[in-house]
Amino acid sequence: MLRIGAALTLADLPLYRDWLIAGQRDLEIQDFIRTDLLLGDWRSHVQAIRAELDGYEGRLGLHGPFIGVPIDNNDPEIAPIITRRFLTALDICAEMRAVQMVIHSPYSTWDYHNLGNDAATAPGKSARELKIAAVHEVMASVVRKAEDLGVTLVLENIEDIDPRDRLLLAQSFSSENVKLSIDTGHAHYAHGATGAPPVDYFVTAAGADLAHVHIQDADGYADRHWAPGRGSINWHAVCAAIAALPVQPHLVLELRHAADIPAAMAFFAREGLAG
């Protein structure tokens, strides 16, 4: 049976720390998506989180920055700022002893329809190659630092329609420290609204490269972050696909309201899918 943890902020930790520690469940800290923290006194915030996690020995991750920092923006003036944000987030990983950091995919709905439009690119360069090259310009030093620190960067689907594009991007770094993340609600939105395959197909396509899953339910129309059981995702298919993987990825509930965690866990228990 799958064991599920949660994605939480410092404010939520007092309520769930005993549950997390009792099962040494996967945990993802989400405070550091905030630009004010990344540019401010993040060390004091880390100390407060570590104090709350005394006794926690589970797999700890961090959600990296994403607000205004697309990883494919290789503008020569803007790219160094974006790179710096991610290097700072890796410093935070080191201070927190986190082993994983979530990064948002650069692939949009527009990309899906235009990555094959090579006539619009420079001679000898495909649109897919140019997209990957842009990400490398921004993230190459971030990947090297992640390797030095032993942190795995996981690329989370956002608007992705074809799950293979993100896999090719991850593998293009030729690094064991770049893997994939799946957000179940994002995949279900893409399935319902833009014609992507269903969520379990995303899991199967990622295969052994899947290292992290955001677990949330949705209706196939928007990014709901509902407790599982309240939307229309086929959780039996999704959990079966995860269980078939060679290594269980980090599994964390990422809900709009942390208060819905007990309801989510009760649903998985009733269905015999996870505990």
Image: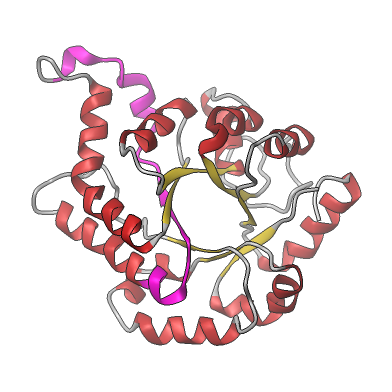
Which quadrant would residue 25 be assigned to in this image? bottom right
Q: Position of residue 41 (x, y in %)?
A: 33, 84
Q: Is residue 74 left or right of residue 252?
A: left
Which quadrant would residue 23 be assigned to in this image? bottom right
Q: Is residue 41 left or right of residue 74?
A: right
Residue found 73% across the figure and 63% down from its top: 261
Given the current orientation, which residue lies at the most extreme top position? 119
Q: Position of residue 134 (x, y in %)?
A: 21, 38
Does the magenta run of residues contain 103?
yes
Residue 275 visible in the picture: yes
**Colour treatment of the image:** secondary structure
Q: Is residue 87 left or right of residue 171?
A: left
Residue found 33% across the figure and 37% down from its top: 174
Residue 238 versus residue 251 in the image, above or below = above
What segment is highlighted magenta in the picture? Answer: 92-121
Q: Position of residue 195 (x, y in %)?
A: 54, 22
Q: Position of residue 192 (x, y in %)?
A: 60, 29
Which quadrant would residue 237 be assigned to in this image? top right
Question: In which quadrant of the rendered image does the C terminus lie?
Answer: bottom right
Residue nearest the viewer, comparing 74 with 68:
74
Residue 191 versus residue 229 in the image, above or below = above
Residue 69 visible in the picture: no
Does the magenta run of residues contain 60?
no
Total marks placed: 0
Residue found 63% across the figure and 35% down from its top: 220
Residue found 37% across the figure and 83% down from its top: 43
